[in-house]
C-alpha cells in the first residue's frame, strides 16, 4: 500500500471522531434548549436576535462609512451652514416618524416579564461590560481625531474622508466575518486586541499607508461593539433589558464624548501619532479593568431565567 493510500485511510478515521463529538455536542445543546423552553428559530428566537444585533452593528458602521464623506462633500458644495440645517431637519423628521409609528422596542415576553431588583443583574459582570463599552467608543472617537491631526500636519487633510471610509469598510467586513463564527469571543479579548492594533497606527504618515494601518482597527470595531451588545443582553433579564441597553448607550456616548478631547490633548502636547497611542492605551486599560472586575469576585446570583439558559456562556469567558 502506498503512502498516499495510507494517508487517505487515516484521514477519515481521524475526522470521524471529531465530527461525532461535534454532532453529540450540538444535539445536547439543542435538547437542553428545548427542555428549558428556549426558542432557537422563528419569530423572537435566539438566532433571529443574534442576527438582528449583528445587522444593527453593520448598519451603524455603514452610517459611519458614508456619513463623514457625504457631509464633507456637501459642505464643500453648498456650505457648512446648509449641511447643519439639513442634518437637523433630518433628525427632527426621523424623531417625528418614530413617534408616530411607535414601533415595538422589545419582544412580547420582555414587556410581560417580571422586573427583578437591580442588585440581581447590575453586578460586577455588567459593570465590567459597561466599562468596556465606554473604552471601545473612546478608542474609536480618539482614532478619528488622530486621523485628522495626522493628515493636517502633512497637508493631506482632503484625504481624511478616504481614510475614514476605509476604516468603516473594514468594520463592516469584520462584523460580517464575526457573525459567521460559531461562538462569540470574549469582550475583553476583542477590546484588548483592538487597542493593540491601534497603538502603532501613528507610524503611518502618508494617507495610503494610513488606510492600510487603520484597517486592523476597522476589522475589530464592529465585532467588539456587537460582542458588547450581546453580553449586555445575556446579563440582563428580559424585564430590565431596556434599562440595561440604555446604560450601555450612555456608556458608549460618554466614551465618544471623551475620546476626541483626550486624544486632542495628546496631539497638542506631543505629535499626532500620540493620538493613536492614547486611544489604543485607553482601549487596553478598559479591557484590563473589565477583565479584573470579572475576576475579582463572582457576580450576584442571577435570576432563574438566566441561570438555566443553556446559551448563557458568560461563565465560560464571553465577558
Image: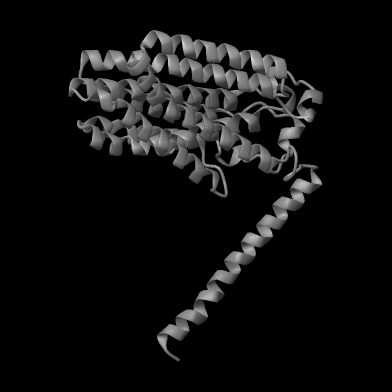
Figure quadrant of residue 267: top left
**Above or below — where is 104 with respect to 37?**
above
Q: Residue at x 17, y 24 (%)?
A: 154
Q: Residue at x 65, y 17 (%)?
A: 97
As drawn, is 28 to the left or to the right of 158? right
Q: Position of residue 24 (x, y in %)?
A: 68, 60
Nearer the observer, 189 or 73:
73
Quadrant of image for the C terminus: top right
* Image color mode: one colour
As drawn, is 120 to the left or to the right of 6? right
**Above or below — where is 39 with respect to 267?**
below
Residue extending farthest to the left is: 154
Quadrant of image for the N terminus: bottom left
Q: Position of residue 238 (x, y in %)?
A: 73, 27
**Above or below — where is 67 with respect to 91?**
below
Nearer the observer, 171 or 290:
171
**Above or below — where is 122 with respect to 58?**
above
Please give the count of numbered marks on the rendered protein: 0
Nearer the observer, 139 or 157:
157
Residue 87, visible in the rendered structure: yes
Q: Residue at x 24, y 25 (%)?
A: 273
Residue 142, visible in the rendered structure: no
Q: Position of residue 170 (x, y in %)?
A: 40, 38
Figure quadrant of residue 107: top right
Q: Position of residue 316 (x, y in %)?
A: 58, 42
Amino acid at each position: 500500500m502506498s503512502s498516499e493510500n495510507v494517508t487517505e485511510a487515516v484521514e477519515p478515521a481521524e475526522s470521524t471522531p471529531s465530527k461525532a463529538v461535534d454532532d453529540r455536542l450540538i444535539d445536547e445543546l439543542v435538547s437542553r434548549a428545548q427542555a428549558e423552553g428556549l426558542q432557537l428559530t422563528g419569530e423572537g428566537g435566539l438566532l433571529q436576535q443574534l442576527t438582528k444585533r449583528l445587522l444593527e452593528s453593520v448598519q451603524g458602521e455603514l452610517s459611519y462609512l458614508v456619513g463623514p464623506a457625504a457631509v464633507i462633500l456637501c459642505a464643500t458644495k453648498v456650505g457648512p451652514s446648509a449641511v447643519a440645517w439639513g442634518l437637523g431637519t433630518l433628525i427632527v423628521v426621523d424623531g417625528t416618524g418614530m413617534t408616530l409609528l411607535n414601533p415595538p422596542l422589545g419582544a412580547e415576553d420582555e414587556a410581560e416579564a417580571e422586573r427583578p431588583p437591580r442588585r440581581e443583574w447590575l453586578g460586577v459582570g455588567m459593570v465590567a461590560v459597561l466599562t468596556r463599552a465606554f473604552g471601545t467608543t473612546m478608542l474609536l472617537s480618539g482614532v478619528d481625531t488622530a486621523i485628522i491631526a495626522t493628515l493636517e500636519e502633512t497637508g493631506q487633510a482632503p484625504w481624511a474622508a478616504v481614510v475614514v471610509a476605509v476604516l468603516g469598510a473594514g468594520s463592516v467586513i469584520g462584523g460580517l466575518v464575526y457573525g459567521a463564527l460559531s461562538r462569540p469571543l470574549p469582550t475583553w479579548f476583542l477590546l484588548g486586541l483592538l487597542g493593540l492594533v491601534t497603538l502603532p497606527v501613528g507610524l503611518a504618515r502618508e494617507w495610503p499607508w494610513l488606510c492600510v494601518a487603520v484597517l486592523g482597527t476597522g476589522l475589530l470595531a464592529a465585532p467588539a461593539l456587537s460582542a458588547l451588545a450581546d453580553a449586555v443582553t445575556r446579563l440582563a433579564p428580559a424585564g430590565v433589558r431596556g434599562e440595561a441597553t440604555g446604560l450601555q448607550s450612555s456608556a458608549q456616548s460618554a466614551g465618544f464624548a471623551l475620546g476626541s478631547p483626550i486624544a486632542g490633548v495628546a496631539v497638542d502636547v506631543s505629535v499626532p501619532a500620540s493620538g493613536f497611542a492614547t486611544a489604543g492605551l485607553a482601549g487596553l486599560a478598559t479591557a484590563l479593568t473589565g477583565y479584573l472586575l470579572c475576576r475579582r469576585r463572582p457576580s450576584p446570583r442571577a435570576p432563574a431565567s438566566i441561570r438555566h439558559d443553556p446559551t448563557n456562556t458568560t461563565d465560560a469567558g464571553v465577558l
